[in-house]
Image (cartoon, grey):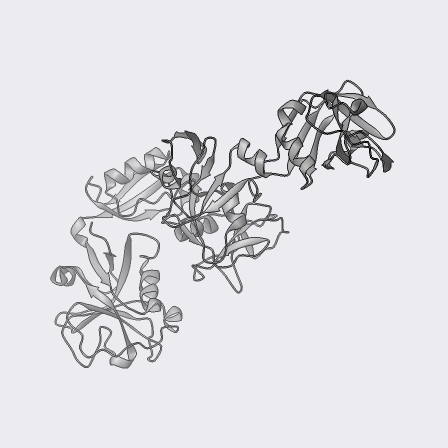
Amino acid sequence: MKITVNGVPKTLKAGATLKDAVTGEQYYEGALVAVHLSVETITRKTNDFELTTPRGKMVLHLDDGSDAEKWRSMISTVEGVTARWVTRKIVAFGAFPSDLKSDPADRLYRKFDCFFSLGGGDNQTTYIMVARNDHRESYGAGAGRIGRITVGRHLIDELREGEGISEIRPVISEVSTENVDVTSDMSYPMAEGYSVDTNVLIKLDPESPIAAEHILITASDLNLEVTDPTGSFIASSEDLDADLKPEKAAVRGTGAVTVRNEGTGKGRIYIYKDKRQIVQSHSSAGKVERGLAMVSMAKKGDRISVVTEPPRMLSVGMTQKAGGDFLSKAGIEQIRKGDTSDGAIIVEQTPERTVEAMKAGVVETFAVPRDRIYRVEITAKDQKTSYYFRKVTGLSHKPIGTMKVQFTYEGASMMTFYGDEVRGKFLHPQELFKKVKRGDIGVTNQARPYCGLMGIRLQDSKEYGPTGEEPYGTNIIGRFADDLNRLLAEAEEDKVIYITEEKI
């Protein structure tokens, strides 16, 4: 069978499921997927049809009765009929054969009602009529009521004899529940003509580089959790600790993506279903180009896969050669700094933000030898503690972070690193340690002065933690999982140390 996935044609075997459709696509496992039904399926399900005439397009909304179902089954027959006559009461399109039964009883018809008529009571000369005003009449097919014209009503008075209905098609709206199924069930059966969106494609706003980068970082693994759904928008509060400032403010139309840049909820990402006015506390971050159905139907706790245009342009963690190749594909020139050899590892990129890098067309990549990047293991059970460490070191948004040495000397029992005292005030004391070992990493919590200070223990101790604090003032972060002697050989006050959680 032939379907479309993320706008690209794809062929699947008979009996294929949604799991087969998403294979090889950008998709976060367990996230929502939108399945747009085929035209044939929509025709069976929808109650709104667009009628194309020489004067313009009208929309017919079907009733729930048997006559409406009869019309649905006769669409191919009705398509192409012309207006045979126009009177003060009605416009009549036809004739065509049907199997309707004759019924001479008169009925009351309201303006814009659409109904069947049998010429002379003969179903071989069946007509479709639209009432131009309220009236009571017998048209030979009983009530014969199909539905009502809801859009393009002014055309009823403009149509002339001989002008016809050239095309009838179901009204296909990306967000209509009649036209699309949104699901995470990978056993959902596929059918010919289906169109599948595995992700929400967001085109970033180049006038808001900070807000755009916040989107890129928050959804760096394709995953965005819906934490605050409303009738007007869905929002994600996954990162409310972002360094933001006001940028471009714009009308928040359907599909608009914004980031709150100040106040309560700073850092919250919004995707809009309905139009809202400009507000300075929201920076325009982008617009949804595909996948709006998932936005419209997502519920609290659902996850959506997010893909951006452009993708994130970050070379940190790559070799100088690989980083250059990566940037070059996006049309960005690389200027090597630090260790410029092909195998050196990029630890800093300037500018780091994607929109700024794309605009500049050139970035500097600062690299160091592989053995100057040290691996750490974050094992803290307390999420606030591990979050603090990743946020302050930069590991929250890139594969290689930094720690700036505050205090060290030969023979010392610990080495300390600058932290963030403001963020450190929110670190509650955790389970008291009984003993810390050489290589343990910790942070001073809110119970002591200099909260937020980070450290590595260089000697085992039952009394003092990695920052020299007693157990109640220490939160253990994890362990230094690399060669401490090599670190000590290069460490000096105010020097930047590069760390990673990955094996490079």
Percent x, y of residue 164: 73, 21
Question: For this view, does 181 lie left or right of residue 428?
Answer: right
Tell me if 357 is positioned left or right of 499 in this view: right
Q: Residue at x 16, y 74 (%)?
A: 413
Q: Can residue 287 be seen by looking at this rendering?
A: no
**Image coords of residue 323 (percent x, y):** 28, 40
The quadrant holding residue 191 is top left
User: What quarter of the picture does the N terminus occupy?
Assistant: top left
Q: Position of residue 493 (x, y in %)?
A: 23, 65
Image quadrant of residue 498? bottom left
Please say whether residue 63 is visible from this viewpoint. Answer: yes
Q: Is residue 41 above or below residue 77?
A: below
> Is residue 333 depicted above or below 317 in this figure?
above
Q: What is the number of callouts on the image?
A: 0
Name the residue at 29% across, 69% down: 381
**Closest to the observer, 452 or 76:** 76
- Camera-side residue of 23 and 145: 145
Q: In the figure, is residue 90 to the left or right of 50?
A: right
Estimate the x, y position of residue 403 in percent, counting from the top left: 27, 61
The residue nearer to you, when weighing 351 against 430, is 430
For residue 353, above or below residue 131: below
Work out whether residue 107 or residue 54 is closer to the camera in this orientation and state it.
Answer: 107
Q: Residue furthest top?
A: 162
Q: Is residue 70 left or right of residue 218?
A: right
Q: Please identify the quarter of the rendering in which residue 401 is found.
A: bottom left
